[in-house]
Image (cartoon, rainbow, N blue to C red):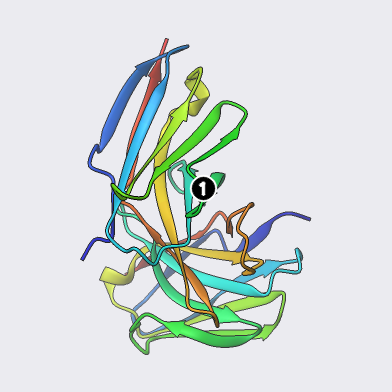
Amino acid sequence: DQQVKQNSPSLSVQEGRISILNCDYTNSMFDYFLWYKKYPAEGPTFLISISSIKDKNEDGRFTVFLNKSAKHLSLHIVPSQPGDSAVYFCAARTNTGTASKLTFGTGTRLQVTL
Amino acid sequence: DTEVTQTPKHLVMGMTNKKSLKCEQHMGHRAMYWYKQKAKKPPELMFVYSYEKLSINESVPSRFSPECPNSSLLNLHLHALQPEDSALYLCASSQDGPGLTYGYTFGSGTRLTVV
């Protein structure tokens, strides 16, 4: 049961343009959503997070939008740079009170071309 | 110090060996995690320690044995592994409070190969 899904396995964007990565989820109990960037054989690097009570969070070139009614979130990167080329994972947190955990989506490989 | 340090970076072990993976953080985080990532798949949670107590075990086989000696250290003891256990093992830590502005911090992982 994949509770967090990224339906686009790959995305190619020209340098300077906007990259939009999408994520859908099924569990209404998620309280935080996060985006991570990952290179092969390295750990995920945190980019940005959003609380389930917000609908937008912005940090520099990165903006995350949350649509709770649609159970959908997206990451916008503007402007896209070649160094942004990596695999991007959406993740969602479940907090039981005694512990919390992240559930990751399936990932989207972003390639930013010159 | 804003890092999670994992050792070793690479490990090759036989199916009868016993080995351990180590993870260390000095950010004062009270929650620590082990994740496993296979090629072209997302990281999957194995264990969660909260305040040095095992809080979540995601039905992981007993050949994987976690240990949290103190709030800064997390170990994963390996014994009688199978070739299908070959993967990237990631350690992470977090403040585990109500807010999550800075996310979980991940180490760079241990690439494990079981032969």
Residue at 35%, 18% (x, y): give it.
A13
Residue B40 appears in the rendering? no
Q: Which residue is mark 1?
A: A54
Q: Nearer the viewer, residue B108 or B111?
A: B108
Residue B101 shown left or right of residue A91 in the figure: right
In which quadrant will I find the N terminus of chain B? bottom right
Q: Quadrant of the C terminus of chain B?
A: bottom left
Q: Chain of mark 1?
A: A
Residue shown at 34% from the left, 55% from the top: B42
Q: How many marks?
A: 1
In the rendered image, which quarter is residue B22 located in? Answer: bottom right
Question: In what element is the residue under mark 1?
Answer: loop
- In the rendered view, does B90 fall on the left or right side of B103? left
Q: Position of residue B62 (x, y in %)?
A: 37, 90
Q: Is residue A83 above or below residue B63?
A: above
- Residue A89 vs A86, above or below: the answer is below
- Name the one closer to the observer, B107 or A11: A11
Query: x, y (%) of residue A19?
Result: 40, 24
- Percent position of residue A30, x then y: 41, 63
The residue at the point 56 percent across, 47 percent down is A46
Q: Looking at the picture, does residue A97 appear above or below residue B105? A: below
- Around disc 1, counting alpha carbons within 10 Å, would you say few (fewer than 14), some (14 to 19), or many (20 or more)? few
Residue B64 screen position, x and y as percent: 42, 83
Residue A10 image-quadrant placement: top left
**Res. B24 visible in picture:** yes
Residue at 33% x, 52% y is A105
- Three-letter residue code for mark 1: Lys
